[in-house]
Image: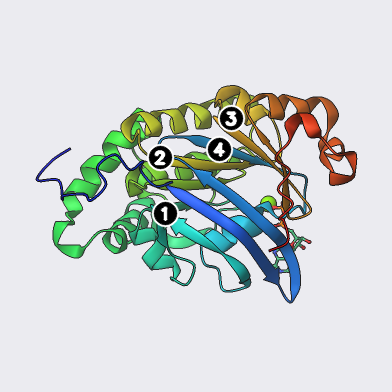
Amino acid sequence: MSGVAPASPVPSAPAPAALEIVDLHVSVEDREILRGVSLAVAPGSLHALMGPNGSGKSTLANTLLANPAYQVTAGRILLAGEDVTDLPTDERARRGLFLGFQHPEEIPGVSVLNFLRQAIARRKSIDDFSVLEVRMNLLDWTKRLGMDNRFQERYLNEGFSGGEKKRNEVLQMAMMEPDVAVLDETDSGLDIDALRQVAAGIAKVREARPHMGILAITHYQRLLEHLVPDVVHVLVDGRIVATGGPEISLEVEARGFEAFRPEFGRPEFGRAHEEAPA
Ligand code: ADP
Ligand code: MG
């Protein structure tokens, strides 16, 4: 808390979700991929979204990023209680949304440092932006994340190993100081040591930003062994078919996603998100 808090008409009102998705329907090339997805990530909490290949996980990530190839046909996206469904990528980033990609792009000729300088300048208003501060902060975070301090001079993702790409995503997350981070398959293609480092890095960023909400998208349970989620959602065929605690990810590991298909009906995990007719 700093400065003078604005007077609130309802002092005891709970903080709005860091990220809320309400009955989201998304089409790609006129094919409906997400068919009514709802979830709410409270400040400080870590949600995992699990699902088989092709279930729509990256579609959700791209939609949250406002990628124009992904068309929202119904539903809403809210950041800290504010509807951002119609806002472009930059505006969402300015409001504290960060996205880590499944396949980070190589940007030849742009160093890690310069990329971050530009991204942070867009995220923050220019007048409270200091290049020196970015440099110092970057040095600090590369150290905290156990990365080589020459890393910042390298060109973004050019010749990075799978592990370096993912650790760089975590570094970007730390530097962008988001309120909500959506991480798409941050664990994909990592060996066990790299996976541990990435999970430890995410944990360090959480310590530094305890109010940050995280939606970690993953195919496998193994990331969640190192990064225990508060809530797990299972996405199958564009719908959330189960929501619960970490035990759900163990269930996925043991029985596969097939067991979560709606036709299996899973009353013990309830809350299948079939939308009731209006
Ligand atoms: P996941 O990340 O869970 O593996 P995706 O969201 O990538 O799933 O894909 C879900 C479905 O949407 C797939 O059938 C895929 O072919 C389709 N899809 C996703 N993105 C695009 C795109 N940019 N163009 C065409 N089809 C897409
Ligand atoms: Mg994907």
Q: Is residue 195 left or right of residue 171?
A: right
Q: Amino acid at mark 4?
A: His
Residue 195 marker = 3
Which residue is denoted by mark 1 in the rendering?
97
State ligand 1's quadrant: bottom right
Coordinates of residue 127 in the picture (x, y in percent): 14, 62
Q: Earlier in the sequence, mark 2 or mark 3?
A: 2
Amino acid type of the residue tagged 2 in the rendering? Pro
Q: Residues within 10 Å of mark 4 (few under 14, many from 20)?
A: many
Whole-number angstrom distance, CA of label 2 to CA of label 3:
25 Å
**Of residues 199 and 264, which is closer to you in this image?**
264
* Cα distance in 3D space between marks 4 and 2: 11 Å
Determine whether the residue tagged by mark 1 lies in a helix, strand or loop. Answer: strand
Q: Residues within 10 Å of mark 3 (few under 14, many from 20)?
A: many
Mark pair 1, 4: CA separation: 15 Å
Task: From the image, state whether disc 1 or disc 4 is nearer to you.
Answer: 4
Amino acid type at mark 1: Leu
Question: Residue 120, percent across and down?
Answer: 30, 56
| Label 2 CA crowd tier, 10 Å (few <14, some 14–19, many 20+) | some
